[in-house]
Image (spheres, grey):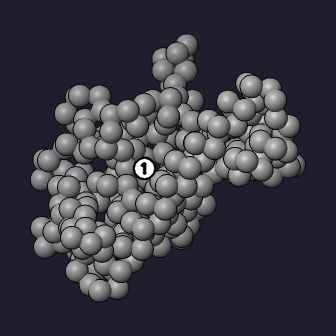
């Protein structure tokens, strides 16, 4: 079986509960994202102005994040939807970090703090994160000395229980669709349409094969980079080579070698 045949087999197994497939399926798909947001936020009036997949929040010196889907509604509120299959990726401090990284991008120099828009970090987890068997877990800051009144800072974190299957509840219907591998099994027509395109049309399968190829190349590049860093560290520890020689031999930039030396 050649690589292309392997990719086509992999595509058959993908679900909306797989983050890369989720991002590819919903990139720019306003109606489908509106449906998910209205379901999770238990509303029917959210209008999405724009939505984009794989939005990166960079930090020059600290850790960066990449959002699976980011949406902005017509009121300017920002909503980040993350798919988390592994329990390791559902940590509460990860949610805090995501929320803070979004916040730091919202104000320019001279802007008022009150201009901060509301933000929503939504984790759709394959397992029931908190084990209560309920569809949604809402995380809000509260003031202890005021009978736990809401702090109302506009930062909202929501965990969606991916195991929830009560079909009389909108979240149960939504979560029924996420593990489906075949579009014909998906209840919501908007989600079914996007899954069908990527899995059952020539254009969609070609798009997914390209994505899988890019992921393989990124993984290879990451592996090569880790090897280069390891070699540079050994050369620095040996103390015989100049920064320029280490950069030339490892393929790292002079700045990267200097950063390793500083650390």
* Crowd around label 1: few <14 · some 14–19 · many ≥20 (10 Å): many
Is residue 76 placed above or below 157 in the rendered structure?
A: below
Residue 44, percent from left and from top: 36, 62
Q: In screen coordinates, is 217 left or right of 179?
A: right
The one of 9 and 89 positioned closer to us in this rendering: 9
Q: Can residue 40 be seen in the rendering of this structure?
A: yes
Residue at 82 percent of width and 35 percent of height: 241
Q: How many marks?
A: 1
Q: In screen coordinates, is 109 left or right of 6?
A: right
Is residue 41 placed above or below 16 in the rendered structure?
A: above
- Secondary structure under the numbered disc 1 in the rendered image: strand
Residue bearing mark 1: 82
Residue 231, percent from left and from top: 65, 37
Residue at 36 percent of width and 80 percent of height: 206
Residue 20, percent from left and from top: 39, 59
Residue at 25 percent of width and 64 percent of height: 10
Which picture quadrant has residue 43? bottom left
Is residue 47 placed above or below 100 in the rendered structure?
A: below
Q: Where's the C terminus, which quadrant?
A: top right
Q: Can residue 112 be seen in the rendering of this structure?
A: no
Which picture quadrant has residue 29? bottom left
């Amino acid at each position: 079986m050649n690589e292309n045949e392997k990719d086509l087999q992999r595509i058959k197994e993908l679900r909306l509960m797989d983050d890369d497939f989720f991002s590819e399926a919903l990139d720019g798909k306003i109606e489908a994202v509106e449906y998910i947001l209205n379901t999770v936020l238990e509303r029917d009036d959210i209008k999405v102005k724009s939505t984009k997949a794989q939005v990166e929040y960079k930090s020059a010196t600290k850790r960066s994040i990449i959002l699976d889907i980011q949406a902005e509604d017509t009121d300017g509120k920002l909503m980040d939807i993350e798919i988390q299959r592994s329990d390791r990726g559902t940590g509460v401090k990860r949610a805090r970090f995501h929320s803070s990284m979004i916040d730091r991008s919202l104000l320019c120099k001279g802007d008022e703090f009150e201009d901060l828009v509301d933000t929503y970090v939504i984790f759709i987890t394959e397992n029931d994160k908190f084990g209560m068997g309920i569809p949604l877990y809402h995380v809000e800051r509260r003031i202890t000395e005021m009978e736990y009144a809401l702090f109302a800072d506009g930062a909202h974190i929501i965990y969606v229980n991916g195991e929830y299957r009560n079909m009389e509840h909108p979240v149960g219907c939504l979560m029924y669709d996420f593990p489906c591998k075949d579009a014909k099994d998906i209840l919501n027509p908007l989600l079914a349409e996007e899954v069908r395109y990527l899995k059952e049309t020539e254009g969609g399968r070609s798009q997914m094969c390209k994505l899988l190829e890019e992921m393989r190349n990124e993984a290879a590049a990451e592996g090569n980079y880790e090897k280069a860093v390891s070699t540079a560290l050994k050369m620095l520890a040996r103390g015989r080579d100049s920064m320029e020689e280490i950069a030339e031999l490892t393929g790292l930039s002079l700045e990267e070698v200097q950063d390793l030396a500083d650390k």
